[in-house]
Amino acid sequence: MQLVTRLLLRLITVGILMLLLALVLSLFAARNDIGHEALASQKIGQLIKVLSELQRDAPLTEQTQAIDALNQSDALRHFHVALLDHKGRRLTQLAEQTDTTSWAWLQKFLASDVEMSTYSLSVLRPDGQRVTVMLEPNPYSESTEAITSALLLLVLFAALTLALIAAIWISLKYAFAPLADILTGIARIESGDYSLQLAPSATRELNQISQALNHLAAALTEQIAKQRELLHRLQDVQEEERRKLAHELHDEFGQLLTAMQVDASYLLKKSADQPALLACAQAMYDNSSSILSQLKNLLAQLRPYGLQGDEEHDIALEQALRDLVRQRQSRGDTELNCTLTVALGMTPVPQRLAVAVYRIAQEALTNVMRHAKAKRVDIQVTIDTETNRLNLRVADDGVGMDAQHTTSATAQSRGLGLAGIRERILANQGRVQWSAAQPHGLVLDASFPLPVNNTSNSNTTRLPDHD
């Protein structure tokens, strides 16, 4: 049902109910007026009876009291009765004015154009005295009735207005109730959670929005899955190229360098009595040894220990990280105190995830050594058994990085390796956060879901500054 149709039906329903209420109140008001008119007719009959008694030989005080009682009963509508003696003195009490009421000004306004003419009737009593019966106009009863009717209409209008406002508010509240779920779904999509399935809504417009969000979440889920698969393939290709390159370097250059060392060693032995040739042979031997050492370091970066197996086998992640830290510290070009903590226990880590964690740690450590000017770096790889996630933290005490650049496109193109880190984290359905360390430095926190939740224990390794 459309929102406009829903609102119109609610308003029509409320309008009909208020019309029925107005009809019922009008009928009760008419019934009350009819009762007042009937009572006034009875009082007029009593007045006629009292006036007829004036011509009889009855005490005048009785008629005076009877007339005062009729006037004070407020049953005589539109007039008061006054009784005057033969000298024109008023025998009955003065009619009570309504000027003291809160509606006196309004009653005066309503009766301002009414002619206040009195009517007199002379009556001869049996004792020969004449008395005068005077009818004094009293429009205040009619004005009071008009004010009461106006107040009733005002109350009905106010009740109708409040009822319509309440109906609109309730209708909008229930009609827009699904908006809370829609806003929650939008927030989940913004945060990267695409497992969204909004329930159908009774309002057509909101139901269309909900279905559109469901389709969007499904499309994003499909695209993210394709993107992850593509990133997996790219990373597999990279690792395969690294493996092939490492094999080629090892097989080709390794053998040639080894042969050069053998030849240089032979020349060293044969040129002991030739100083010039001996110096050249020594230089050849030293250079080949240096190149061979650099080649070993390069091979360790391309395919470290534990990563040489096939993709279907689990790698020795802890040993690979240990070798990574030792190899970086063995360079001697920076004084960096590195602490490695690995707490995997018996939890198996998938091959692709282990490679991704190693490469992220490798890139992060490279950034620390090149840009952070840090004296200390802590690397932690732990398993959270409650959430069944693998957590990686790399924290340094270097110069840090402006927080506003940690998520911008400019930072990803500054050679800090953030783009590669983000791609690997995205490919493994992980989450990443950069934050400032205290008192200075940078902290990288990455978290990855694990397919299996097993028990784990802790193994902490303290590595020396240089190996």
Image (cartoon, rainbow, N blue to C red):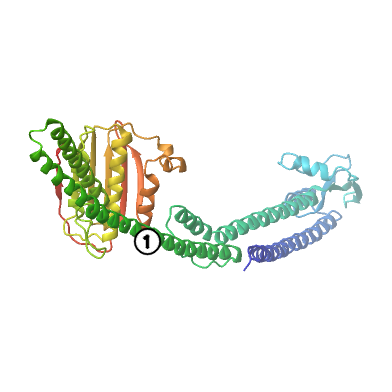
Q: Nearer the viewer, residue 418 or 66?
A: 418
Quarter of the image where one finds residue 462: top left
Q: Nearer the viewer, residue 435 or 204?
A: 435
Q: Is 214 placed above or below 463 here?
A: below
Q: Position of residue 169 (x, y in %)?
A: 59, 56
Q: Does 148 sit left or right of 316 as displayed?
A: right
Q: Secondary structure at mark 1?
A: helix
Q: Is 47 placed above or below 361 here?
A: below
For this orientation, the residue located farthest to the front is 274
Q: Does 208 sit left or right of 419 as displayed?
A: right
Q: Does 324 sit left or right of 25 as displayed?
A: left
Residue 62 in sight in this render: no
Q: Position of residue 239 (x, y in %)?
A: 31, 56
Three-letter code for the amino acid on which mark 1 is drawn: Arg
Q: Position of residue 427 (x, y in %)?
A: 37, 57
Mark 1 — residue?
Answer: 233
Q: Nearer the viewer, residue 287 or 304?
A: 287
